[in-house]
Image (spheres, grey):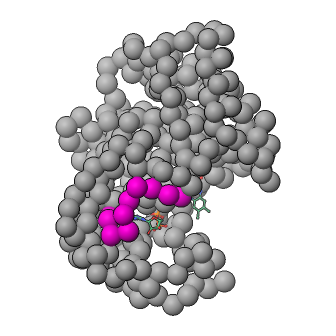
Amino acid sequence: MKPAAFDYIRADNTEQACELLARVEDARILAGGQSLMAVLNMRLAQPGLLVDISRVASLSQISVTQGHLQVGAAVTQAALEWRPDLAQELPLLKQALPWISHFQIRNRGTVCGSIAHADPSAELPLCLLALKGRVLLRSAKARRELAAEDFFTGMLTTARAADELVEAVRFPLVRPGQGFGFREFSRRHGDFAICAVAAVADAAGLRVAVGGVADRPIAREWPLLEGSALDDALNELAWGLDARDDAHMSAAARRHLVRRLGRQAIEEARNSR
Ligand SMILES: Cc1cc2nc3c(=O)[nH]c(=O)nc-3n(C[C@H](O)[C@H](O)[C@H](O)COP(=O)(O)OP(=O)(O)OC[C@H]3O[C@@H](n4cnc5c(N)ncnc54)[C@H](O)[C@@H]3O)c2cc1C
């Protein structure tokens, strides 16, 4: 299928992009187009205007600021993946990024586009939540910042208002004593996750986030649980995610993946501290 007709403007700067979002009611941001074009081709959305931000220089920056790695809206997943210091700065992202589809998709798809799209099976929303990252939103009138926990509100749904641009996201840099683990199960390499788990361990305890099971990534914090106490916590988490049977897998198998991948990711996080 072909998309319905739309107007297209390539924004020269962030102000122009925000101005267009404020002025044109049915305008949508076009970043890498790796999710949006499929949505348009299937006519699941029919925006009147696409505002292309992919060549806005000020949105193409990755910077270290106040203990965070800040990633601008036009930065591709590949640019982040191949940042020379990423393994030292954000080991969890270094592990998770190669799981996003194939390199051709990561060459076009943006980090912020994945966050804005909010697919419950996507790796970047999961990591942002696991790391307690933040989303920087900007409209023609104001700026605000939301914790990942408050940003993802449901299936492909976020707290972003229609006239807001996700200007950047912030991932907290690794701190001494932290360890990270990531596990994913998908049908074939490069497919969206059927279940993915990201774990962060430090001296105080564990933070575990699960994607692909509920309508959005979900995180829990626990003390440093061991043995059957950890099994019980993972089992409770697995049942709490409201897994559903679908064409890919039964709810029971998804709960099994949460327990199994959860334990593996936690062990990896503990061992890498
Ligand atoms: C074959 C295939 C396989 C894939 N597999 C995976 C996978 O395994 N894991 C995974 O995580 N992803 C996967 N993806 C999705 C891919 O990662 C997308 O690139 C990503 O989800 C969206 O980023 P984008 O830059 O392409 O955004 P676009 O497609 O341009 O936009 C997506 C949506 O977000 C909005 N948007 C984008 N940027 C902003 C912004 N800055 N502010 C406000 N709104 C914005 C757009 O208006 C649109 O609604 C796959 C895609 C394809 C085509």
Residue lying at 58% horizontally and 9% vertically, measured from the top left: 226
Q: Is 63 placed left or right of 209 in the picture?
A: left
Give the image location of residue 263, x and y in percent.
63, 22
Residue 32 can be seen in this image: yes
- The answer to whether residue 176 is magenta is no
Q: Quadrant of residue 12?
A: bottom left
Give the residue at x 41% y 74%.
Answer: 28
Q: Is residue 84 above or below residue 234?
A: below
Asked if residue 163 lies in the magenta stretch, the reply is yes
Start-end of magenta stretch: 156-165
Q: Residue at x 27, y 49 (%)?
A: 145
- Number of numbered tags placed on the structure image: 0
Question: Residue at the location (65% across, 17% down)?
Answer: 232
58 versus 173 height, above or below: below
Q: What kind of secondary structure does the magenta stretch mostly adopt?
A: loop
Residue 272 seen in this snapshot: no
Left-right relation of 62 to 36 = left
Q: Residue reaching furthest top?
A: 227
Q: Position of residue 114 (x, y in %)?
A: 47, 56
Residue 20: quarter of image: bottom left
Q: Position of residue 181 (x, y in %)?
A: 52, 28
* Quadrant (top left, top right, bottom left, bottom right) of the N terminus: bottom right
Coordinates of residue 127 in the picture (x, y in percent): 46, 40
> Residue 23 vs residue 202: left or right?
left
Most foreground residue, 139 or 108 = 139
Q: Quadrant of the C terminus?
A: top left
Identify which residue, 247 or 71, lies in the foreground: 247
Identify whether 179 is placed above or below 93: above
